[in-house]
Amino acid sequence: MGGLKDDSTNKKRRRYTIPASEFGFAVTTTFGVGAPVQTELSTFGYAGLLMGAEGDMMNVLDHNLISMLDPDESVGVSVLWAPVSTIAAGDILDWIVLYDQVDVGEALVLAGTALDTVIANQTGATTALVLHRSSRGIIDPGKMDWTAKQGALSFQVELNDWGTASADEIMFLGLQLDYVPSYFGNANEDVNTLGEAVVSSS
């Protein structure tokens, strides 16, 4: 059996999805114009966050992705959503995603770093209850810190504009990210990072 090709290790992208059920939701105007409410999609038993107003925001602290990705590679970022009812085909949805990296021992903050390539506006959909994915935003290579891979990534997702759509017509279903796994060590990463994660009490 032949050895692994370079593309089989370093360049094999993976997909990672943070479902809406993992996101906290806004409770004051500090976080958005309205307060997205965790709601069942139709009668399917699927959890989503119902957008009540333009400017609604959702926040999540993810503890898994940072330990898996290669910081020297780009990270793709897309929003998963569905129209709860029919919305005009010409309506424009403007999703804004911010992020930040925090390590163990560092102060937690709200995500505040813009994507290097923002998510392009997306036209509406005339059919209700269809799964949609936004265009792909990008976090450029080198924006993550090799020495801070024991911590977490924070994300904030905002529906900044929805054209002529109305309240409770659009449901946020999740944040989808694509990344290149970190298969090998790096000179900037502590070689004992996994062992330290077990005993660290910082």
Image (cartoon, helix red, strand yellow):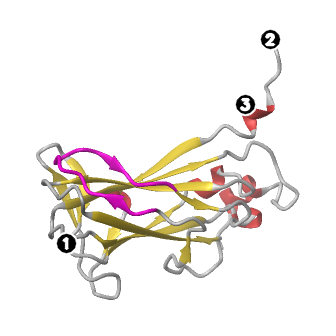
Name the residue that disc number 3 marks.
Answer: 8
Q: Earlier in the sequence, mark 1 or mark 2?
A: 2
**Disc 1 + disc 2, Cβ < 8 Å:** no
Closer-to-camera residue (57/105): 57
What's under tag 3, amino acid-wise? Answer: Ser
Residue in view at x 74 percent, y 33 percent: 7
Q: Which mark is residue 28?
A: none
Residue 4: % across, % down? 79, 25
Cα–Cα gap, marks 1 and 2: 56 Å
Instruction: Check if mark 2's residue and mark 3's residue have beta carbons within 8 Å.
Output: no
What's drawn in magenta, residue-wise?
120-136
| Disc 1: which residue | 52
Q: Secondary structure at mark 3?
A: helix
Q: Which residue in the structure is indicated by mark 2?
A: 1
32 lies above or below 51: below
Distance of label 3 from label 1 (alpha carbons): 44 Å
Characterize the local packing of mark 1: few (<14), some (14-19) or many (20 or more) Cα atoms within 10 angstroms: some
Q: Is residue 63 left or right of residue 22?
A: right
Q: Amino acid at mark 2?
A: Met
Query: Which numbered disc, 2 or 3, marks the residue that appears first in the sequence?
Result: 2
